[in-house]
């Protein structure tokens, strides 16, 4: 026996979401069915208005309500520091620390031969344009320490070698409160490699 078509269509749509399989999609659809109609109407309205309410910042390529975004428009930000990240969510994670006061450049992904993502799919040309027009003193490569992030960082490091700019990378190692016996070998190796002087 199948669900009524309205439920089955919703399950099919939900199962197309990242990390959502058919069983999870079924649970979500049945949960949505149990919600008040006013809540569902508000959700439908938000989904309908999603594309119209979001733009890409013309300066940093972040998802924003306006262009330029509030960070690029803020004249108090340090324009000598440029933090290169993969996605808007990475920028927001750094912003949540309240430890960085520079500007950002969102690549829109990372290099991946498996997923057919080459340099032409990323916002690399606009990064080079920034170096020509408003060169920062330092570029921080804040990319994930996975294979794709490392590949992208290496590509950018080689590309930026021709420019008179300091290129740095986020430090890697043990997080605060971590226990050595629970850390994986690569994390411990990174902690040793990127160790700091203890003064």
Image (tube, rainbow, N blue to C red):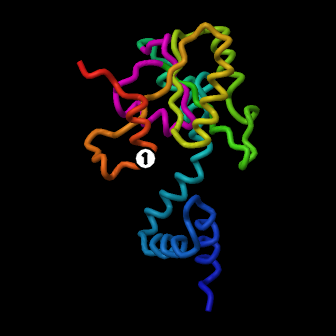
**Vertical side of 164 occupied by 142: above or below:** below
Magenta-tinted stretch: 77-102
Residue situated in front as seen by the camera: 172 or 28? 172
Residue situated in front as seen by the camera: 74 or 45? 74
Quarter of the figure with residue 163: top right
Residue situated in front as seen by the camera: 18 or 57? 18
| Residue visible at 33% across and 40% down in the picture | 175
Please provide percent x and percent y for residue 159.
Answer: 68, 20
Residue named by callout 1: 185
SS state under label 1:
helix
Quarter of the figure with residue 4: bottom right
**Vertical side of 47 occupied by 140: above or below:** above
Please provide percent x and percent y for residue 114.
Answer: 72, 49
Please provide percent x and percent y for residue 190.
Answer: 43, 36
**Vertical side of 169 occupied by 40: above or below:** below
| Residue 16 magenta-highlighted | no
**Residue at the extreme bottom:** 1
Q: Residues within 10 Å of mark 1 (few under 14, many from 20)?
A: few
Tell whether 172 sits left or right of 167. left
**Vertical side of 58 occupied by 137: above or below:** above
| Residue visible at 54% across and 54% down in the picture | 45
Quarter of the figure with residue 173: top left
| Residue 90 magenta-highlighted | yes
Image quarter of the N terminus? bottom right
| Residue visible at 43% across and 15% down in the picture | 77
């Amino acid at each position: 026996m199948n669900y009524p078509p309205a439920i089955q269509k919703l399950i099919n749509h939900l199962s197309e979401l990242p990390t959502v399989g058919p069983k999870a999609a079924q649970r979500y659809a049945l949960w949505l069915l149990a919600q008040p109609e006013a809540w569902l109407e508000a959700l439908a309205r938000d989904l309908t208005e999603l594309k119209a309410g979001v733009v890409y910042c013309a300066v940093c390529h972040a998802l924003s309500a306006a262009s330029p975004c509030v960070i690029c428009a803020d004249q108090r930000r340090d324009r000598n520091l440029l933090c290169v990240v993969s996605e808007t969510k990475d920028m927001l994670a750094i912003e949540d620390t309240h430890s960085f006061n520079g500007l950002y450049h969102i690549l829109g992904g990372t290099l991946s031969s498996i997923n057919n993502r080459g340099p032409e799919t990323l916002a690399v040309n606009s990064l080079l344009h920034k170096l020509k027009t408003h060169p920062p003193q330092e570029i921080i490569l804040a990319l994930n320490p996975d294979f794709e992030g490392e590949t992208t960082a290496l590509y950018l490091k080689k590309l930026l070698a021709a420019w008179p700019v300091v290129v740095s990378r986020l430090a890697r190692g043990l997080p605060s409160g971590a226990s050595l016996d629970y850390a994986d070998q690569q994390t411990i190796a990174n902690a040793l490699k990127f160790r700091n002087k203890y003064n």
